[in-house]
Structure formats: C-alpha cells, structure tokens
Image (cartoon, rainbow, N blue to C red):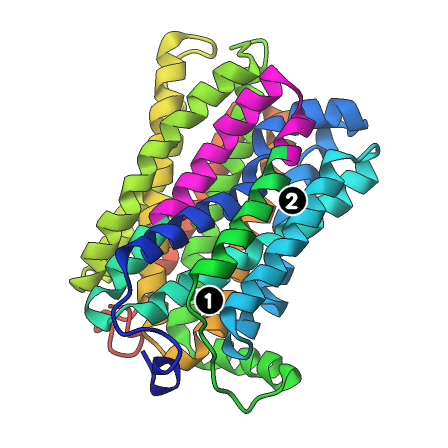
Amino acid sequence: MTATDAHSIPAAVPSWITLLLASACGLIVANIYYAQPLVGPISATLGLSPHSAGLIVTMTQVGYGIGLLFLVPLADLIENRRLVLLVVAVAACALAAAASATSAAAFLLASLFIGLGSVAVQILVPYAAHLAPDAVRGQTVGKVMSGLMLGIMLARPVASFLTDLFSWRAVFVLSTLVMLLVAAVLSRALPPRRPVSDLGYGALLRSMGTLVATTPLLRRRALYQACLFGAFSLFWTAAPLLLASPAFGLSQTGIALFALAGVAGAIAAPLAGRCADKGWGKRLTPVVILLVASAFLLSKFGTDGSTAALVALTLAGVVLDFGVSANLVFSQRAIYGLNAAMRGRLNGLFMATFFVGGAIGSAVGAWAFAQGGWALTSWIGFALPIAALLYFTTEPRTGATLRSN
C-alpha cells in the first residue's frame, strides 16, 4: 500500500469487507454472462440469425473492453467508491433496457452498456489489492476473484433456470434490482480510497501507451490470458448450442445443471492466490495452460448424445474453468505487484486485452458451431491455449526482467 492510500483506508481491514467485495464482484460480473446460455431464445425472440447470434455475447464483451480502457483507469484519479457507484448505475440502466428491448438493435445496444457498467468489478479487485499487505495480497485477490468466478459460473445456470420458469426477460429484470441493492450496500459499507495524482484524464490515458511499451510482464500476462479466455468464451458460447441440439436435446434446465458443474473451477482462485504468494506463479503457468488445452481434448470423448459424451463435456467444463481461473490469479498477483499508484491502469490494460480475446472467442464459437459443429469448435478451442503455451516458451528463464513472481 502506498503512503497516499494510507490516509483513506484503515490499517486493519475486517474480513467481512473482503467477503462483501467478493460478493459484489460476483453479482456484478454475472451481468456479462447471463446471455451466454440464452443465445438461442433471445435470438428467436429478436430475430437474429444463427450466424449473428454470437453478437449477443460479443457486444457485452466489447462494452466491457471499452470500459476497461476508458473507465477503469479512473481508479488512479477518482475516489474509488464513488466511481464504482456511478459505473454500477450504468449497468442497472442498461439491464432495464435489455429487459424491455423489442428489437435486436435495441438489445445489442443495451448489451454494450451492460458490459460498460460491469467494469465496476475491475475497480473493486485492485481496490481489494490496495487493502492487503504484500505478504497476503495474492490470497486477498484470490478470495475476491473466487467470488467473481462464482458469479461468472453461476450466471449461466441461474439464467437458464429463470428462463425455463419465466422468460429470458426475467433474468434482466432481476439483475436490475440486484444492481440497485449492490449499489446501496456498497455506498454505506466501503471505506473511501482517494488516490493522489497530478495527471489529468488525457494524460492518464496517454500514460497507458507508455505502460504497454515498457512493461513486458503486462504484455505477456495479458496475451496468455487472452488466449485462455478466448477458449473459455468459445466453450461456454458453443456448449449450450451443442446441448440444445438434437444430439442431446437438453432443455434450459438441463443446460443450467450442466453449467453448475463449472462452479467447481472457482476453487482454483484461492488456491492460486496462495501459490502466487509463495512465488510459484510462473512455474505453474504452463501447467494451467495445458489444463485448458486438455479440456478440449476431453470434450471430444464419446459419441454425440451419449451419456459418456455428456460426462466428458461436463468434466471438460470443470477443467477449463479451473485452468482459466488459476492463470487469472497468477497474472493479477504479478501485475498488482508492479506499481500501486498505477494499478487501475495496469488492470484496465490487462483486462481489456484478454477480454478482446473473450469477445473474439464468443463470436468464433457461435460461427464455428454453425459451420462445423463441435468438431470444428473444439479444435479451435484447443489451438488457443496451445498458442499461449508456445508464447510462454519464449519467456526469459531468469524472470528478473519480467518480475513474473
């Protein structure tokens, strides 16, 4: 923690604040993923073609990427609690607009702003890192990230259950109300954090280019995670389409039960945080990358529609989520250790880069499944972590330059 932060954040942070941050992150980030298992029903209602269906998820991730680049860096400039509340308000308005959309264009525009408002989580995660002393920063980030990952993984089954019971619009109505509740609680519970900076907004944004050019650790970690998150988004966009196809014929409830299995991957975040605090992040990175690649090979086991194939696909989701979650925490622990005064910008650049990978993965997943089914989709998914692994082999062995541990 820097001297400029010490006057605005208590020396000892109660554990309930960490729990609150984890819960808030999970509830907010879920907004990005509610639509993933609902691509089919939303497309049918709004008249989107199968080849364009991936835009439902992609637009949310594009909005998230814009927010990461232009809103998250403001955490180095503006009091963090107030910034979070403003951004959550954007998410609430956008969710309400999505719930009432009557055309594809209106829904896609609302999706863009849902993503923009959901970047509040990427202001809260570095905020949590500011609260923690260096010796346990990885564990603190890991605990908050476990909440975030639970939000990502539970969003899909919750959305499917609600759609099966009511309609897909009910998902967005409920989330609007949840965002209003989250904003009310955070406004009363969070201690303020007032960064001290003499930069204006323009200079703040310009400094991000310098950070990219002069921080090899940031570039590497962002590109590793872009490949893994691209594979993650591809899997969770295409898998519901596969399960709803005639081969499996699962209902939205069945797809929800399948998605629940991915929640098991959330245990990776706190485990990865402890490993990162011990300096093991770099040596375990290729291990978790290989886990993600192996998930796609596992998903090819069995004949489409068979019990064996369904079990294999479910296990693949668990392995995939575990590997992606672990690498995310390794990367954040390393990046947050670079410069506390620049955490907002570092986090914004890191997240924006890998969410571009996620947006591409979502779009490619829907397209690949429409073109060549799961066979084509899974091979593309396999290629993404393999590309990350090949890039990892070029990393300097000493780690001194990259400060990756």
Relative to 24, say whether 8 is above or below.
below
Q: Say which element carries label 1.
A: helix
Instruction: Determine the image quadrant of residue 39.
Output: top right
> Of the residues under marks 1 and 2, which one precedes in the sequence?
2
Amino acid beneath label 1 = Asn
Q: For the point 33% across and 25% down, which residue is it? A: 315
> 190 above or below 376?
below
Q: Say which element carries label 2.
A: helix
Give the magenta range.
146-173
In this rendering, the answer to whether 386 lies above or below 198 is: above
Quadrant of the rendered image containing residue 293: top left
Q: Position of residue 73 (x, y in %)?
A: 55, 72
Q: Residue furthest left?
A: 278
Q: Position of residue 114 (x, y in %)?
A: 65, 48
C-alpha separation, residue under disc 1 versus residue under disc 2: 21 Å
- Residue position for label 2: 58
Q: Position of residue 167 (x, y in %)?
A: 67, 21
Most prominent secondary structure in the magenta stretch? Answer: helix
Mark 1 Cα-neighbour bin, 10 Å: few <14, some 14–19, many ≥20: many
Q: Is residue 147 magenta?
A: yes
On the question of residue 389 being in view, the answer is: no
Q: Amino acid at mark 2?
A: Thr
Label 1 with label 2: CB-CB less than 8 Å: no
Q: Position of residue 345 (x, y in %)?
A: 50, 73
Q: Nearer the viewer, mark 1 or mark 2?
A: 1
Q: Nearer the viewer, residue 186 or 134?
A: 186
Q: Quadrant of the C terminus?
A: bottom left
- The numbered disc on residue 347 is 1
What residue is drawn where x is 72% and y is 35%?
99
